Amino acid sequence: MIDINLGENSYKIGFTKDLEIPSKNFVAVISEKVRQLYKFDFENMFILKDGEKEKNFKNYLKILEFCSKRDLKRDGAIVAIGGGVVGDIAGFAASTYLRGVDFIQIPTTLLACVDSSVGGKTAVNTNFGKNLVGTFYQPKAVFINTDFLKTLSDRDFKTGLGEVLKYGFIEKSCLCEEEFNLLNFLDNNSKKILERDEKTLEKIIEICLKLKKSVVEKDEKESGLRRVLNFGHTYAHAVEKLTNYKFTHGECVAAGIEFAFELALKENLIDKNYLFYMQEVMKKFDFKPVPKFSPKKLLPVMKYDKKSDPDGINFILPSDFLTVKEVKYPITIF
Ligand code: GLY
């Protein structure tokens, strides 16, 4: 059990083998794949097709109208059962339906377990880019059952590893009291991780969540420290959009990490040995390569990124071993 301490928005992350839904009165927003695989059959079930493209306003509105049709009241809850897409859109619906109903996350992908189900970011995409509309709305509880990870496709499993590696490279910047040496652990245990050894997966999920807890408890609404969690993401979101979401978030984050290291080397923030070490570790997880885009193509998309401001685009770059910092680039630099 991990407690996320955020005053009145505090909640617990439970590790469980049972599907526990404490609210009697709820609408489940569930991934189509998960529903088919596990034959879930709830009374009020909104089934969402898989894929980032489903995280749109049309589906958001459909969820809200489904809740009204099923007479979900303010004392009810929306329960997300699926990966990041389901969690983000269901969370956005929960935060706005009747001005907010309880929200419960049951992540079924590695990516959702280690990152998106915790911390309260909700979102939908617009034609201008990824996650451009959303709220900070903490769940009431998160239940993690690692059995779900056994049925993920290799591609979906690896997309979660993109986020796990992100935590490895930013560990010191998370300012957590405990030291994990996550990157070293990933480097030494890649085989077990890729074989989805349960104990190993539980360990890396727990470490990532403790790192995330440390950051989110210090900066819930991303006014400063929380930006470190966007390591690799400015580039990733732009590539996801430019490829029309054909590449997964984790594949693009892995490419974003490499991009950030190359930029940091050019800026003399890191030395070559650290770049080589990053490449060596990343190679062990064999991420699907994503297409490279020229700055001319990237820039118009990056400029809509939430992290950009009128003077330029903000990147989180490695600045020391397991440490990152924010660097602003004026748009003219590209
Ligand atoms: N996924 C980054 C964050 O939760 O801030």
Image: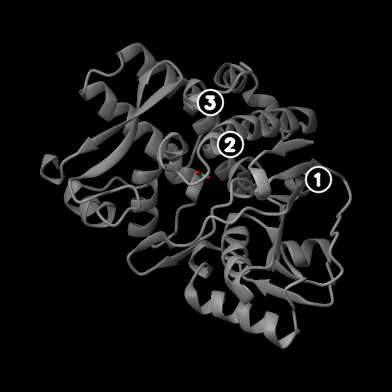
Q: Residues within 10 Å of mark 1 (few under 14, many from 20)?
A: some
Q: CA distance from mark 3 to mark 2?
A: 19 Å
| Circle nearer the N terminus (2, 1) | 1
Any atom of ligand 1 within 8 Å of the CB at mark 2?
A: no
Residue 171: horizontal and vertical position, in percent? 52, 23
Question: Spatial distance from mark 3 to mark 1, Cα to Cα?
Answer: 24 Å
The residue wearing badge 2 is: 217
Q: Are marks 2 and 1 in contact (CB under 8 Å)?
A: no
Answer with the quarter of the image where residue 147 lies: top right
Q: Earlier in the sequence, mark 3 or mark 1?
A: 1
260 left or right, relative to 182? left
User: Residue tagged by mark 3?
Assistant: 168
Q: Secondary structure at mark 2?
A: helix
For disc 1, the marked residue is 147
Helix, strand or loop under label 1: helix
In the rendered image, residue 320, in percent from the top left (x then y), is placed at 38, 16
Estimate the spatial distance between the alpha carbons at disc 2 and disc 1, rounded to whole Å. 28 Å
